[in-house]
Image (spheres, rainbow, N blue to C red):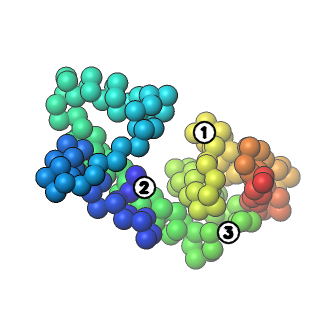
Amino acid sequence: MPESRGRVLRPLLGLPRDALQAYAEFHRLAWVEDESNADCRYTRNFLRHKVFPLIASRFPKAGQQLAAAASRFSEVDSLLEDLASLDLRGSPPEFPMSLGLFRDLPDTRSRNLLRAMLTWHQVQPPDECRLNEFVRQLRTTGNDRHPRIDLARYSLWCKAGHLHFKRQD
């Protein structure tokens, strides 16, 4: 979760829970706990209540190290988004888009560009195996072939040298 996204700011996100609780108690603030935070059916809560305490008992600085790694991952994600914007070469991030963009880039950057395009269109990229195979086909297929991928929320397909996108609403 980023500390800021648009107008949403989370300035206390990096503080440990016990520090926040101590501050709230000291200033006599009412502490409100979302009851869903205790429900271990949710993966985040299972990790928080079952897995992380076990890891922290063996590796006391694990929480700090994971938070630092998450911060670096966030920075890397931002850099990859910037790289995808550069790889568009001034084209708008819109479909249909020329297959030439994918063919002129190395494999890794082609995959990054497709992931970014789908994220910018607010859909989840396919799993890595399907994404890798689809990008391989985009980069190598002849004009007589029409690679296509259909997922629950959208479809991608090639036609006339362009990659097309349609949301399944």
Question: Which is nearer the eye, 95 or 70?
Answer: 70
- Going from the N terminus, do you reach mark 3 or mark 2 first? 2
107 lies left or right of 162: left
- Position of residue 12 measured from the top left corner of the image (x, y, whole percent): 27, 57
Say if residue 82 shows up in the picture: yes
- Position of residue 128 measured from the top left corner of the image (x, y, whole percent): 58, 39
Q: Residues within 10 Å of mark 1 (few under 14, many from 20)?
A: few
Residue drawn at point x = 71 percent, y = 65 percent: 95
116 lies left or right of 73: right
Residue at numbered disc 2: 77
Give how far apart the Cα atoms at labels 1 and 2 are.
17 Å
Residue drawn at point x = 72 percent, y = 48 percent: 153
- Position of residue 15 measured from the top left corner of the image (x, y, whole percent): 22, 51
Question: Which is nearer the eye, 7 or 105?
Answer: 7
106 lies left or right of 133: left
Circle 2 — which element? helix
Residue at numbered disc 3: 94
Q: Is there CB contact under 8 Å for labels 1 and 2?
A: no
Residue at numbered disc 1: 127
- Would you place residue 105 above or below residue 68 in this image? below
Q: Is there CB contact under 8 Å for labels 3 and 1?
A: no
Q: Residues within 10 Å of mark 2 (few under 14, many from 20)?
A: few
Question: Which is nearer the eye, 115 or 121?
Answer: 121
Q: Residue furthest left?
A: 26
